[in-house]
Image (cartoon, rainbow, N blue to C red):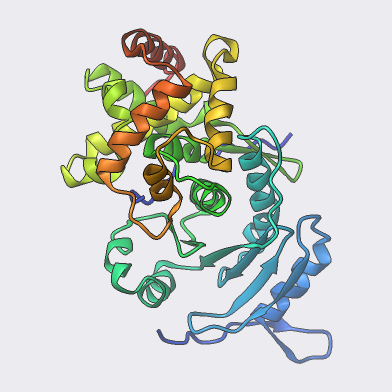
Amino acid sequence: MNRTLAPFCALAIFLSGCSEREVSPADSTGGLIDADQAMVGYLQQQGLPALKLAQTWNNNYGTGIELQTQHYQVYTTLLDPLMLSQVPGFLESAWRGYNRQLLGAIETKTRFTVYLFADRAQWESFTDEFAGPRAKMYRKIRAGAYYLKGACVAYNIGRERTFCVLGHEGWHQFNYRHFKFRLPSWLDEGIATLFETYRYEHGLFYFEPGRNPARLGDLKKTLASKKMIPLRELISINPGEVLAADSAGGVNAFYCQSYALVRFLREEGYGKRLPDYHKLLLDGLNGAWPLSEQAQSFAGDRNIPLTTAWNRAISPMLFERYIGGDFEQLEQEYVAFCRKIVYRVRFR
């Protein structure tokens, strides 16, 4: 049995020149086959269930191909046969996983766009053009991906870590497209972390959030250092606030605690809060949160920056409305859950 558990990868906190054409070995007629055409032929011969179309992609960054699945359009300069043969299945598995966060499947009518580059230089060149004035910020990402203008933009940092960031950023892409209201930061980032680790078995991908070594490791360190962010504060802040404070430990604490909080709502007490969790998400999906008319307008307008003040005002109110307002009791249960899930974590 082939089991692969992907390690955690570095993620985006926020959350051109032509390269020479590669050439493949000679074909049966003695001529030369361009690398992109050879890869298209290879993928077509694999009979991949998730792959609907493969064709060459003309671009200014490198030799590339375009992949099409039921829900994704992938533009890539990465010509690694193993990775490319698994990308369609991984993305479709992630799409099904995103849907399972809800009570019913969402029909995605327009394919999501993914750019996957072979190396960082190509990724930076694309980012300079694609992100415009915001490119400088995204170039600070040391190893990962970002979501912008409806597209997930990544580059190859190794098979496991690349799929890890695609799974994480893909959730942001999914909920940005389908949810009428924007999610509070802890909820948005917490759910995204559920798609960072997976098991690959017999051609299928299974996401395993309970086996996320980096998030669990950071959580254990945070508990040991007694620097846990209080629950009321955790649900009120966003990663940008912590980053502005220039606290790497604070950023790690925010992400690992958000990861643990989402798992707490889904798993603790045999899932006793799972219906409340689903209701919170479903109402966000349908635009049914009990907000004032002004707050609803703000929550639904993706063109308005999601400010720190809005997050601090709305998130606690939603948490109290859907999960509960006894923060002292919730804090005790949450911390106990955190200690339980890191009990077997060992540091190398």
Residue 320 visible here: yes
Who is closer to the viewer here, 206 or 325?
Answer: 325
Give the total of numbered labels.
0
Residue 346: x percent and y percent?
A: 40, 21
Image check: 11 left or right of 228?
right
Q: Is 44 situated above or below 188?
A: below
Image check: 11 left or right of 116?
left
Image check: 230 left or right of 155?
left
Residue lying at the far left of the rendered structure: 245
> Which residue does the image show at 51% across and 62% down from the upper left?
150
Who is closer to the viewer here, 94 or 188?
Answer: 188
Residue 7: x percent and y percent?
A: 49, 39
* Residue 199 lies in quadrant: top right
* Residue 227 lies in quadrant: top left
Q: Classify the position of the C terminus by image quarter.
A: top left
Who is closer to the viewer here, 297 or 153?
Answer: 297
Q: Classify the position of the N terminus by image quarter.
A: top right
Image check: 25 left or right of 141?
right
> Which residue does the image show at 56% across and 63% down from the upper left?
114
Residue lying at the far front of the rendered structure: 293
Residue 11: x percent and y percent?
A: 40, 48
> Which residue does the image show at 56% across and 54% down from the upper left?
177
* Residue 239 lies in quadrant: top left
Q: Is 272 situated above or below 291?
A: above
Residue 242: x percent and y percent?
A: 23, 40
Residue 252 visible here: no
